[in-house]
């Protein structure tokens, strides 16, 4: 799901950020914890506190020329109880304030210190920096001095509840409410067109927010579209298919993330965990917390058999099946009125089987949502990220600009040829027109910095 590989940028690229001044981890930063209890009576999306911060540009170690604020806002947890989270709002020097792009990074972690609000800041160190800045580069044509206002929420929340769909949805939608409540400070237009985007774990988060928007935040009519690549429609399948392969560590991240939000599961898993595997299993809980360069990272879990860590193997899948399905199976909450864009590789080692995504698209179309679906035969998770970028960029650009897009829910969207030859969508006259218009708007390709 976000399932992005562990990529650390060259140490020389990180040094300027390291020496530019320390930035506190969220777990040590008082800003993340509200004072008193009065905030608990506020409406979701209400701003508890705000602060101006410095963020990095896409060139590591170079501070962005954009202004940025962080908002501590009211939201809901998995059990619909009032809680709080933080979002980072970036306003470029010549921002188009009639548009807002909400980017959900795939920070995939049960560790609060991996949150985007930390990783994006000047002075951040370690995996949180490399992970979140890499994700922001997935929308690089929009990270420019005359781009849209950016919203980048800590959608896992204060308890780092990775792969907990409903809570993720609440946190994203309430972050958008908070940004519009902050509009006078940043000059954002009240009816600014908004688009949500995410890849992998960020796609998981984006889809959940999309399907829950009509019931949870129906007043957010500013949302005009949501684009996502590599979303896992069924988290239980991810546990099964990622149990002992290259992505086994992802399995552990997801398990720990759910345990952070579901005490009963945490108690069972902790008791069932074999003593000799305890340190390895809980290692990812400090994936970003450890002091960068001073302590060794946790033992890598790729190609380990995670079920062997427990006395009863994968029994948790059956004991908590109803809970896992409630938290992780998409398409059961509703469907948005705004348009959606999916892209998926047929050989994605995370999203297996591909039919799960096909079914999700068909279900959303049946409920009335306009869904454009591009399938990439034979491509894996990371290959899909690269191949799908130009197409999703053009789609996002058109929606933000208020231009028409190719209608979705056509035959190729509803019944893509699984495993068949790739269709060259660029021969589609409508798609060509849309991309031409987007190129004029974006001047793609582009590599301007914030």
Image (spheres, grey):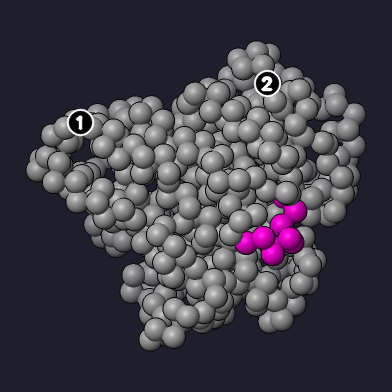
Classify mark 1: helix, strand or loop: loop
Q: Quadrant of the C terminus?
A: bottom right
| Measured Cα–Cα span from mark 2 to mark 1 | 36 Å
Classify mark 2: helix, strand or loop: loop
Q: Is residue 289 left or right of residue 423?
A: left
Residue tagged 1: 313
Q: Position of residue 104 (x, y in %)?
A: 56, 54
Residue 63 or 350: which is nearer the viewer? Answer: 350
- Looking at the image, the residue that sits furthest to the left is 275
- Is 221 magenta? The answer is yes
Q: Main SS of the magenta segment? A: loop
Can you say whether 444 is above or below 50 in the image?
above
Q: Position of residue 316 (x, y in %)?
A: 25, 37
Counting residues from the start of the chain, the first of labels 2 and 1 encountered is 1
- Looking at the image, the residue that sits furthest to the top is 420
Residue ID at (63%, 33%) = 363
Can you say whether 431 is above or below 117 in the image?
above
Residue tagged 2: 416
Can you say whether 430 is above or below 292 in the image?
above
Q: Is residue 262 left or right of residue 415?
A: left
- Number of marks drawn: 2
Label 2 crowding class (10 Å Cα cut-off): few <14, some 14-19, many 20+? some
State whether residue 291 appears in this view: yes
Label 1 crowding class (10 Å Cα cut-off): few <14, some 14-19, many 20+? some
Q: Quadrant of residue 385?
A: top right
Q: Quadrant of residue 413?
A: top right
Q: Position of residue 151 (x, y in %)?
A: 62, 63
Q: Is residue 389 left or right of residue 243?
A: right
Q: Which residues are magenta?
A: 217-225
Residue 442 or 263: which is nearer the viewer? Answer: 263
């Amino acid at each position: 799901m976000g399932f992005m590989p562990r990529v650390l940028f060259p140490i020389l690229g990180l040094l300027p950020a390291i020496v530019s001044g320390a930035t506190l981890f969220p777990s040590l930063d008082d800003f993340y914890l509200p004072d008193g209890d009065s905030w608990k009576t506020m409406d979701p999306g209400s701003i508890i506190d705000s602060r101006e911060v410095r963020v990095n540009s896409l060139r590591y170690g170079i501070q962005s020329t954009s202004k940025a604020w962080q908002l501590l806002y009211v939201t809901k947890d998995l059990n619909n109880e009032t809680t709080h989270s933080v979002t980072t709002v970036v306003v470029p020097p010549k921002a188009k304030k009639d548009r807002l792009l909400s980017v959900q990074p795939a920070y995939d972690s049960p560790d609060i210190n991996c949150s985007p609000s930390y990783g994006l800041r000047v002075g951040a160190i370690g995996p949180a920096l490399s992970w979140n800045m890499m994700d922001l580069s997935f929308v690089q044509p929009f990270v420019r001095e005359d781009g849209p206002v950016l919203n980048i929420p800590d959608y896992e929340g204060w308890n780092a509840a990775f792969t907990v769909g409903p809570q993720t949805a609440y946190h994203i939608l309430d972050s958008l409410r908070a940004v519009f409540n902050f509009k006078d400070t940043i000059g954002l237009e009240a009816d600014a067109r908004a688009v949500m985007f995410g890849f992998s774990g960020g796609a998981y988060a984006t889809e959940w927010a999309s399907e829950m928007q009509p019931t949870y935040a129906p007043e957010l009519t500013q949302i005009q579209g949501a684009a996502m690549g590599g979303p896992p429609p069924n988290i239980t399948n991810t546990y099964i298919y990622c149990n002992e392969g290259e992505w086994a560590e992802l399995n552990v991240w997801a398990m720990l993330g759910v345990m952070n939000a579901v005490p009963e599961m945490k108690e069972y898993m902790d008791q069932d965990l074999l003593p000799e595997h305890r340190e390895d299993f809980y290692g990812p809980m400090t994936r970003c917390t450890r002091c960068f360069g001073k302590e060794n990272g946790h033992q890598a879990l790729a190609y380990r058999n995670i079920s062997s860590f427990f006395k009863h193997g994968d029994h948790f899948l059956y004991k908590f099946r109803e809970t896992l399905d409630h938290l992780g199976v998409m398409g059961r909450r509703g469907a948005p009125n705004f348009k959606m864009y999916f892209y998926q590789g047929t050989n994605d080692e995370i999203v297996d089987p591909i039919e799960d995504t096909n079914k999700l698209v068909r279900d959303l179309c049946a409920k009335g949502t306009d869904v454009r679906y591009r399938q990439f035969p034979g491509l894996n998770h990371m290959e899909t990220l690269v191949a799908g970028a130009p197409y999703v960029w053009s789609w996002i650009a058109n929606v933000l600009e208020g231009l028409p897009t190719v209608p979705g829910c056509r035959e190729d969207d509803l019944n893509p040829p699984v495993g068949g030859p790739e269709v060259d969508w660029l021969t589609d006259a409508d798609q060509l027109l849309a991309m031409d218009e987007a190129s004029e708007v974006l001047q793609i390709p582009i590599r301007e910095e914030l």
